[in-house]
Image (cartoon, grey):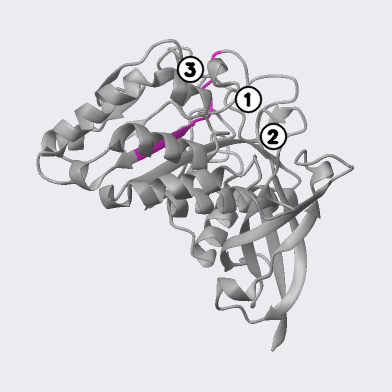
Amino acid sequence: MSKVKAEYIWIDGHQPTSKLRSKTKIIEGPISSLKQIPEWGFDGSSTMQAEGRNSDCMLLPVCFIPDPIREGDDILVMNEVLNADGTVHKSNSRAELSEIADKYNDHEPWFGIEQEFTFFVGRSPLGWPDGGYPAPQGPFYCGVGADEVFGREIVEDHMDACVRAGIGLSGINAEVMPGQWEFQVGPLGALEVSDQLWLSRWLLYRIAEDYGVNATLHPKPVKGDWNGAGAHTNFSTKAMREKGGIKVIETACEALGKRHEEHIAVYGAHNEERLTGLHETCSIHEFRYGVSDRGASVRIPMATANDGYGYLEDRRPSANMDPYEVCKMLIETCCS
C-alpha cells in the first residue's frame, strides 16, 4: 500500500454558470477501482449549494483518471454532489443525464464536443496590445507564428496532459479571434464525453494557472466585431450512422427546431450575446438547419450529406454550457 493524492473535482451551485471546485484527499493506493475511493464531505455553504445552518454536502466519486500534473499513482476524481442524506443535490445535472442515457441506450448516441475558450491576462485577451486591439480577424484561425497565435505553450501543455490522463481528446486548433483556442473531446457516449469535458476544463484552468493566465468560457468575452466562443456539439445515433441515416438526421433536425427555446434555456448563460446571426452563428431568435452552413443553428456536414449517413452539429451551445444538460436535451429530443 502507498499514499495517493486524490484530487476531488465537482461542479458547484454558482448561477447562472456553474464553476469547478476541487480539493485533495490523501488515500491508500494505488487505485484500480472506483470502490477504493471514498465519498467525502464539503461545506456547501461556501459553494452556493447549501445554507450555513445545514451546510454539509457529499461528493460521490463517479470516475477517475491519472493525474497528469502530479503524476505517479495520483488521480483526478470526478464527483456527483449529494445532499447530506444521500439524495441527489439539485445542482447535480449528471444524475439526470445518467437516467436519460440508460433509457435510450439502445440508440447508441455518440457525442463530440468542440470546446472553445479565450485566454486573458488581466482585463485583456492574451497577446492583445494594452488598451488596444490587434489586427482584424482573418489571419489567426489555425495560424502559426508569434504574431498570429498567443498561448500555444499553454495549449500544448494542456493537450499533453489530457493525453497522458487518457482523456479522449481528438484535436486542438487556434480560433478566429486572437487569444482564442479550441480543443475537441469525443466521439464518446454521453456520460463519458461530459465527464471528460469537465475534467479537461479543470486541467485547462489548472495549467493556465501556472502561467499566470486565466482561461474563460464566456460566450462573448470581447464585445464588437469579434467571434464569440461556443461548444459546438456533434451528435449521432446508431441509425444516423447507418446507410440511409440522413433521413433520421433530417427528422432529428425538425424535432430540434420544435424545441428550440427549451434547448436554448440550457445551452449556456449570455448566449444571446454570441448568437446574433453574425460571426458564424444563427440568431438566437430563430432556428434553421442546412448542409455545410455555419450560419445555421444546426449544420449537416457536407460529407454526411454526400454519404447519406453520419452526424449533425448543433452549433447553438455556448462555451460555458453544462455538457450533462446539453447531452440530456439532445438525447431526449432526437431519440424519443
Separation (CA) of disc 1 from disc 2 = 9 Å
Ranked by sequence position, the earlier of labels 1 and 2 is: 2
Q: Position of residue 321 (x, y in %)?
A: 54, 34
Q: Position of residue 79 (x, y in %)?
A: 63, 56
Q: Position of residue 294 (x, y in %)?
A: 34, 23
Regarding residue 216, the answer to whether it shows in the image is: yes
Mark 3, residues whose alpha carbon is within 10 Å: few (<14), some, or many (≥20)?
A: many
Q: Secondary structure at mark 2?
A: strand
Q: Secondary structure at mark 3?
A: loop
Quadrant for the N terminus, please. Answer: bottom right
Q: Which residues are magenta?
A: 225-234
Dot 3 amino acid type: Leu
Q: Is residue 213 above or below residue 106?
A: above
Q: Is residue 251 above or below residue 83?
A: above
Dot 1 amino acid type: Pro
Residue receiving disc 1: 221
Separation (CA) of disc 3 from disc 1 = 13 Å
Front of the two marks 1 and 2: 1
Separation (CA) of disc 3 from disc 2 = 22 Å
- Residue 226 colored in magenta in the image: yes
Q: Residue at x 56, y 52 (%)?
A: 200
